[in-house]
Image (cartoon, rainbow, N blue to C red):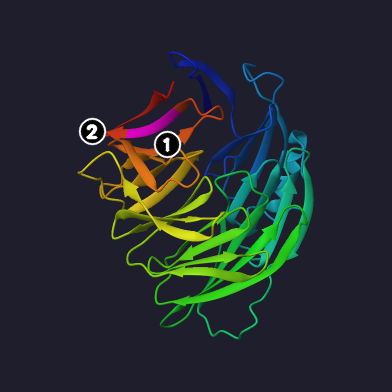
């Protein structure tokens, strides 16, 4: 059951607008446009609609299972599930950008499915390109990375687990062309952990050691930044780079330069164990050694080389921001109790 809250002023519970038809676990929810609500589960995707978000019940428009090529209407559920007979495959990795929904499944692991979930149409199935080099591997994994901004290019990372090292091959899928771009780059790291970020036409990759920044349109390596224990994050028009759990530098996509960063408002800085995410514009958050979020503001001017620490919060599991960028919602866990907190910016 999903509970809807109005948090514009004092939080008010509006009710339970829908209950999942299939309930296959692993919920991720997303609002598309003004009147469409998408629920992504382990084995299925459900799409609900409403004329007003305040409606008591949101009707289910359609649903589809993993590897389906067409959507199904609510009155077909019993027949579809009988045919399916419990032989279900899972969604391994997915993205949602606007009305685009794309995923890899556990059935055809190298096949990429792209749907228009607003209209219930499968737009494309395409095989992920094969690496040009022969690799002896034990396992293969697919991951998807998308921009913090609305960007129609998606990063697909394929990891080949070998005996003593891991080969990571990176591709770019274009939602405008509904196909993979010619760009491809391969990095071999001694371990499986890595991170990447995409911004405009640039891709940043790190194995928590060096940072590699590419122009994926021209397939050119722009710069390699030697670092130690680093992470990366796309913030407005920059790639933020950390080193040894501290704010370190930014790569400017306009000047193509890496400039050192200075935190200008505090002497006792929180540790930056991981980059969390870009909230909006120049505001972002990181994760400290207790796995709690710390909130920051990058410089207010295009070529500014300063960062301002805003605040930190404890006991926070996840956080999200509304589309008008006025309120931040925290899911907290304190002394065994789980609750939600709302922070108003203005």
Q: Secondary structure at mark 2?
A: loop
**Residue density around tag 1, few if under 14, some if 14–19, many if 20 or more, within 10 Å:** some
In the image, farthest residue toward the left: 268
Q: Position of residue 86 (x, y in %)?
A: 63, 53
**Residue density around tag 2, few if under 14, some if 14–19, many if 20 or more, within 10 Å:** few
Residue at 27% x, 38% y is 265
Which secondary structure is most common in the magenta stretch? strand
Q: Nearer the viewer, residue 4 or 76?
A: 4
Q: Position of residue 313 (x, y in %)?
A: 30, 35
Q: Say if the magenta span includes residue 331.
A: yes
Which residues, given as a range, are shown in magenta?
A: 328-332
Lateral position of residue 178 relative to residue 46, left or right:
right
Residue at 56% x, 30% y is 323
Precedes in sequence: disc 1 or disc 2: 1
Q: Of the numbered discs in the image, which one, if any, rests on residue 335?
A: 2
Q: Nearer the viewer, residue 69 or 167?
A: 167
Q: Of the numbered discs in the image, which one, if any, rests on residue 200?
A: none
Lateral position of residue 189 relative to residue 182, left or right:
left
């Amino acid at each position: 059951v999903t509970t809807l809250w109005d948090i514009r002023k004092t939080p008010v519970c509006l009710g339970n607008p829908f209950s999942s038809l299939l309930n296959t676990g692993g919920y991720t929810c997303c609002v598309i446009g003004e009147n469409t609500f998408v629920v992504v589960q382990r084995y299925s995707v459900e799409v609900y609609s409403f004329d007003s978000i305040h409606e008591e019940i949101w009707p289910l428009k359609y649903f589809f299972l993993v590897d389906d090529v067409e959507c199904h209407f609510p009155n077909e559920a019993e027949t579809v599930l009988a045919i399916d007979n419990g032989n279900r495959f899972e969604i391994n990795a997915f993205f949602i950008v606007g009305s685009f929904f794309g995923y890899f499944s556990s059935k055809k692991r190298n096949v990429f499915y792209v749907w228009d979930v607003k209209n219930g149409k499968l737009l494309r199935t395409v095989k992920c390109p094969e690496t040009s080099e022969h690799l002896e591997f034990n396992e293969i994994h697919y991951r998807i990375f998308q921009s913090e901004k609305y960007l129609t290019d998606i990063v697909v990372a394929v990891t080949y687990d070998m005996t003593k090292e891991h080969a990571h091959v990176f591709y770019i899928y274009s939602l405008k062309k509904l196909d993979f771009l010619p760009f491809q780059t391969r990095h071999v790291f001694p371990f499986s952990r890595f991170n990447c970020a995409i911004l405009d036409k640039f891709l940043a990759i790190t194995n928590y050691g060096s940072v590699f920044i590419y122009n994926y349109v021209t397939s050119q390596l722009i710069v390699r930044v030697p670092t130690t224990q680093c992470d990366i994050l796309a913030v407005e028009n920059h790639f933020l780079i950390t080193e040894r759990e501290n704010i370190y530098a930014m790569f400017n996509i306009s000047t193509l330069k890496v400039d050192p960063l200075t935190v200008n408002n505090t002497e006792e800085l929180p540790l930056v164990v991981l980059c969390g995410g870009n909230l909006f514009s120049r505001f972002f958050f990181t994760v400290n050694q207790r796995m709690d979020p710390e909130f920051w503001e990058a410089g207010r001017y295009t070529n500014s080389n300063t960062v301002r620490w805003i605040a930190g919060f404890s006991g926070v599991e996840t956080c999200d921001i509304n589309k008008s960028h006025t309120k931040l919602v925290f899911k907290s866990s304190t002394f065994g109790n789980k609750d939600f907190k709302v922070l108003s910016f203005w």
